[in-house]
């Protein structure tokens, strides 16, 4: 059976159908050797999976030594320009109130903007910060780039919906450690750990607000890092909970060993893929009118969900039924 009607992306109008789709893993590195290794690993895994399954974000905020910001920005520019065709490379610059912010964008976006997928802006507190970032970006890179923003304080969480509404914002990330630290000791240090971050009430509230704000405007909510990078079980648990219980569709990695567990946690399983494909193929045969499948009624409201299952499967390199490949 082959799809016989219009493309699901065009037929299934609505927030879910039109949401931004990004690789589910965003891998951060700031040391030169690790940045080069990350770009090499991205190329290798792209060849393995047939699609780019994670972004590489070159880090200027935590990666640049104090006093060496200009040299680090020049290195990041060099690496971005040298990345192979098809690579997905981004950069995290300094916050908008940092003395190096303008210089970061002038150097990196001005020279290598055409090779970048987006710019990550840390410590965003309000829409005004986004507007300032956009203004500076366009001064140095008139073509523009999507902005990803890092929400790291109670103030920023309170304004998450306004920030997500900005048209240049593509993704919202949660900065767990800075968020906990912003509470002046009121949240125990355990709140930054892989386990407690899913039960501490203020942290849970922040995560849900950010995910809800992102989905409200068709943007991508990106989950925070797990710092216990040698604890694979903890990472798998955190990634599964972020994806299944908290509505996140992307997650940060800070070590190469975290990439594959994140892909696995955020990817649909074979049963979900087969179910989604069967329902959508039947819907296409019915010209997207309501159908009955497995004793349940389905229409465009549920079709949107199942289409996103296939989109996520494709983005994570999972095999798709041959009958759906014409959609990708």
Image: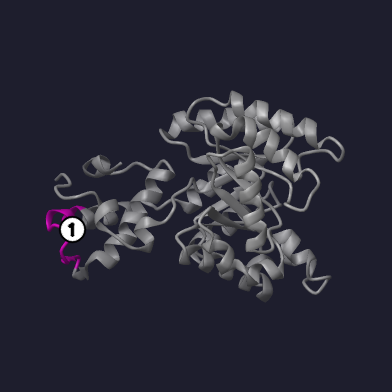
Tell me, yes or no, if residue 56 can be seen here.
Answer: yes
**Label 1: few (<14), some (14–19) or many (≥20) C-alpha neighbours in 10 Å:** many
Q: Quadrant location of residue 138? A: top right
> Depth check: 277 or 289 in front?
289
Report x, y in % for residue 279.
22, 58
Which residue is denoted by mark 1 in the rendering?
Answer: 283
- Residue 138 to residue 46: above or below: below
Residue 326 belongs to magenta span: no
Report x, y in % for residue 214.
51, 62
Report x, y in % for residue 110.
64, 34
Residue 293 belongs to magenta span: yes
Q: Quadrant location of residue 305? A: bottom left
Q: Residue at x 60, y 23 (%)?
A: 82
Q: Residue at x 77, y 72 (%)?
A: 187
Q: Quadrant of the N terminus?
A: top left
Magenta extent: 281-294
């Amino acid at each position: 059976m082959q799809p016989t009607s219009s493309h699901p992306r065009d037929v299934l109008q609505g927030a879910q159908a039109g949401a931004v789709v990004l690789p589910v893993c965003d891998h951060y590195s700031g040391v030169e050797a690790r940045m080069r290794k990350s770009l090499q690993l991205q190329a290798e895994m792209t060849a393995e999976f047939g699609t780019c399954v994670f972004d590489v974000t070159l880090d200027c905020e935590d990666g640049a030594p104090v006093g060496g910001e200009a040299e680090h920005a020049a290195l990041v520019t060099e690496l971005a320009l040298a990345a192979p065709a098809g690579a997905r490379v981004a950069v995290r610059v300094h916050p908008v109130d940092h003395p190096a912010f303008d210089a970061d964008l002038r150097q990196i976006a001005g020279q290598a903007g055409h090779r970048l997928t987006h710019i990550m802006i840390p410590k965003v507190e309000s829409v005004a910060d986004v507007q300032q970032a956009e203004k500076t970006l366009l001064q140095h890179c008139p073509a523009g780039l999507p902005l990803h923003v890092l929400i790291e304080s109670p103030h920023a969480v309170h304004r998450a919906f306004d920030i997500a509404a900005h048209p240049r914002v593509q993704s919202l990330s949660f900065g767990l450690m800075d968020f906990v630290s912003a509470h002046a000791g009121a949240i125990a240090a355990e709140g930054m750990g892989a386990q407690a971050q899913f039960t501490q009430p203020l942290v849970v509230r922040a995560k849900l607000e950010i995910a809800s704000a992102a989905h409200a405007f068709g943007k991508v909510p990106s989950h925070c890092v797990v710092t216990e990078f040698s604890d694979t079980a903890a990472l798998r648990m955190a990634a599964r909970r972020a994806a299944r219980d908290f509505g996140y569709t992307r997650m940060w990695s800070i070590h190469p060993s975290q990439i594959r567990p994140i892909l696995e946690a955020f990817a649909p399983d074979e049963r979900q893929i087969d179910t989604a494909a069967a329902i959508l193929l039947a819907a296409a045969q019915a010209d997207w009118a309501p159908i009955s499948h497995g004793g349940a009624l389905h229409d465009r409201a549920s079709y949107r969900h199942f289409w996103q299952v296939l989109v996520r499967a494709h983005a994570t390199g999972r095999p798709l039924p041959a009958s759906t490949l014409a959609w990708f």
